[in-house]
Amino acid sequence: MNTLHHSPTTEGPAHAALDISALVGAASWQTLSPAIRRRFAAAHDDVSYVGEMELRASWIGRVFGLAASLLGSPLAASRKNAVAARVNVRNDGNGGVVWERVLGGQQVRSTKRVGPDGALEECTSGGLSMHLDVFVDDGALVFQSRGYFLLLGRMRMPVPGWLTPGTCRVEHRDVGPGQFRFTLTMQHRLWGRTFHQTGVFNDPHPL
């Protein structure tokens, strides 16, 4: 087990424990590979994944990246190849799971958790947050946004779609023994594709 030590990143009362398998549904969950099910199992051990990413952002994506940085919620708004990347995953102590992505010298951190309505949400340390759907698509586990909001204490302020970088789709797909591909795409209904990031990571605990 690779135990990580970080300061807490979430505030407020504890949420229901995140269980991705329950949100996906038993039948769909069983269609995923054993490796994916283990990586997203409820209350799994803290772990780090190391790999390389390709980063792409349109000009409007870079504008959104700058705006998000003012909220303390950076988006990787670069255009680079073979960026050294590390993803640290840990339980936050309040029922959620922290995903900390270190891309070169930039850190992007968010927490997936169960929201007040019992659905999945992802919140950054700066307050920019998404309502998420989670489902299986052709053997991959997919997280897709269905709206953004700002989390200010216990206040939730919806963000109009035109003020966001677009629908966010994250795909987690096995590509070989002990390896998986992470792909993030953001598609805006007016501006088209604003972000595209993809890379292959090594699993320190291959099946």
Image (cartoon, rainbow, N blue to C red):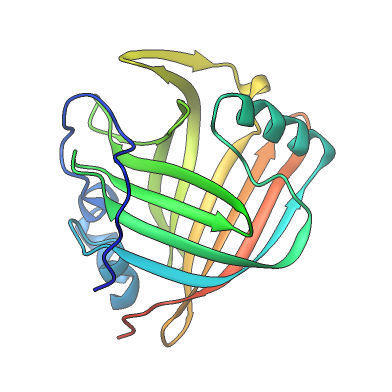
Q: For the C terminus, which image quadrant?
A: bottom left
* Residue 184 drawn above or below residue 111: below
Check the image and report above or below for 56 versus 152: below
The percent position of residue 154, horizontal first and vertical second, equals 30, 14
Q: Which x, y percent locates residue 115?
A: 27, 30
The answer to whether one can see residue 33 in this image is no
Residue drawn where x is 56% and y is 24% of the image = 71
Name the quadrant of the N terminus. bottom left
Q: Residue at x 19, y 42 (%)?
A: 95
Q: Is residue 99 left or right of residue 70?
A: left
Vertical position of residue 46 compared to residue 72: above or below: below
In front here: 193 or 123?
A: 123
Residue at the extreme right of the image, as rendered: 59
Q: Could you say where residue 186 lies in the image, as x and y percent from the top left?
A: 64, 43
Q: Is residue 168 left or right of residue 120?
A: right
Residue placed most toward the observer, 125 or 60: 125
47, above or below 57, in the image: below
Q: Is residue 185 left or right of residue 178?
A: right
Q: Position of residue 7 (x, y in %)?
A: 31, 43
Question: What count of labels does the image hold?
Answer: 0
Quadrant hosting residue 65 = top right
Whether residue 98 is visible, yes or no, is yes
Front in this rendered view, residue 104 or 164: 104
Q: Residue at x 38, y 48 (%)?
A: 134
The reply, left or right, for residue 181 in relation to residue 94 is right
